[in-house]
Amino acid sequence: MSLPYNDYSTRLREILGTRIQKISINAGFTCPNRDGKVGVGGCTYCNNQTFNPDYCQQDKSVTQQIAEGIAFFRKKHDEQKHLAYFQAYTNTYGDIAHLIDLYEEALSYPGIIGLVIGTRPDCINKELLDYLQELSGKCYVMVEYGVESTCDETLKAINRGHDFATAQRAIRATAQRGIHTAAHLILGLPGEDRTTLLSHAHQLSELPLTTIKLHQLQLIKGTVMAQQFATHPDQFRLFSVDEYIDLCIDFLELLHPNISVERFTSQSPPHLLIAPDWKVKNHEFVVKLQRRMIARNTSQGRLYLYKS
């Protein structure tokens, strides 16, 4: 059955010719918004414990994490290839020789056929892009930028440490080199109403993105935002599942149809999650969204306005 949106998993299988599983890696990086170069304390919503699998620990080597990750996913799908996903913190933030050593250690592992590198748009440079451009001629390479919002006022409020123009420059510089380029966006950050949230679709559609990753705002224990919510809950708009499904569909209708969508939601560990607690697994959410898109007789890009 044809999906009503441009699905990243389907697109990736078309590109690489097989089922793909990403293996998360914590390579021990930090972030310029934590170590004082840009700021301290990190982004107000961030607690990296929310997306590190159990096997993904920085005291283990890249090779060990990959081995354990592949073993974990082999229980479900034996016949598949893997991408090494440098996920935790800022994975282009460091000496370039050290970065290359880590990337190539991952690529040397049997069954790893490419890299996905999560980073900030203010932590990329020409030398590294030159290397990644050359590497992309040999294997699959995607750079995933944390954009989070296209609104500078929001980026300042969440202590992001860069503006949207920085993200625009990084995305364009990466895509111009033929490197797959992704953007990560949080829907529901404080101060952003429906008009602002949908304007993100317009803004990102004008960039040469391969892929976008969405997820709902989640309030996580141990974060500045959790403290803000406890003090001023009226400043937050937390969506129900149905409300968020409709928001995602409205967003998709405005999004350029060539941009593939990797995900709509994120699931944080229950012991860290404050709200919203939907008790809906990611795959269950996707099925609900697909069914509602069909019921609404709509599709990604239906309302996208091509520039002449």
Image: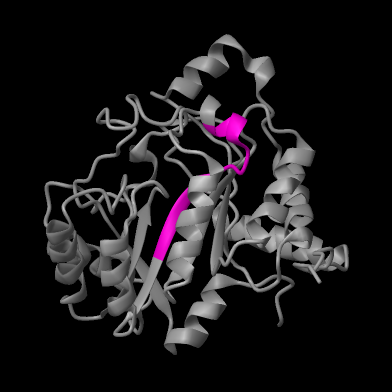
Q: Which residues are magenta?
A: 143-155
Scheme by which the image is coloured: one colour
Residue 151 belongs to the span the image colors magenta: yes
Asked whether 55 or 83 is in front, the reply is 83
Q: Is residue 194 left or right of residue 234?
A: right
| Residue at position x 16%, y 62% in the image | 102
Q: Residue furthest top?
A: 231
Residue at position x 32%, y 66% in the image = 129
Q: Residue 13 location in percent, x, y?
A: 48, 83
* 179 shown above or below 163: below
In the rendered image of this protein, does residue 104 appear above or below residue 49? below
Which residue is rendered at x = 56% and y = 79% of the image?
10
Number of numbered markers: 0
- Front position in the image: 14 or 244: 14
Horizontal side of residue 193 vs 35, given as left or right: right
Q: Where is residue 139, by image quadrant?
A: bottom left
Residue 65 percent location from the top left of the image: 19, 60
Quarter holding the C terminus? bottom right
Out of 274 and 46, give the one closest to the viewer. Answer: 46
Can residue 276 be seen here? no
The quadrant the N terminus occupies is: bottom right
Place of residue 170 in the rendered image (x, y in percent of width and height, measured from the top left): 45, 56
Q: Position of residue 16 (x, y in %)?
A: 42, 86
Left or right relative to 108: residue 211: right
Q: Is residue 53 visible?
A: yes
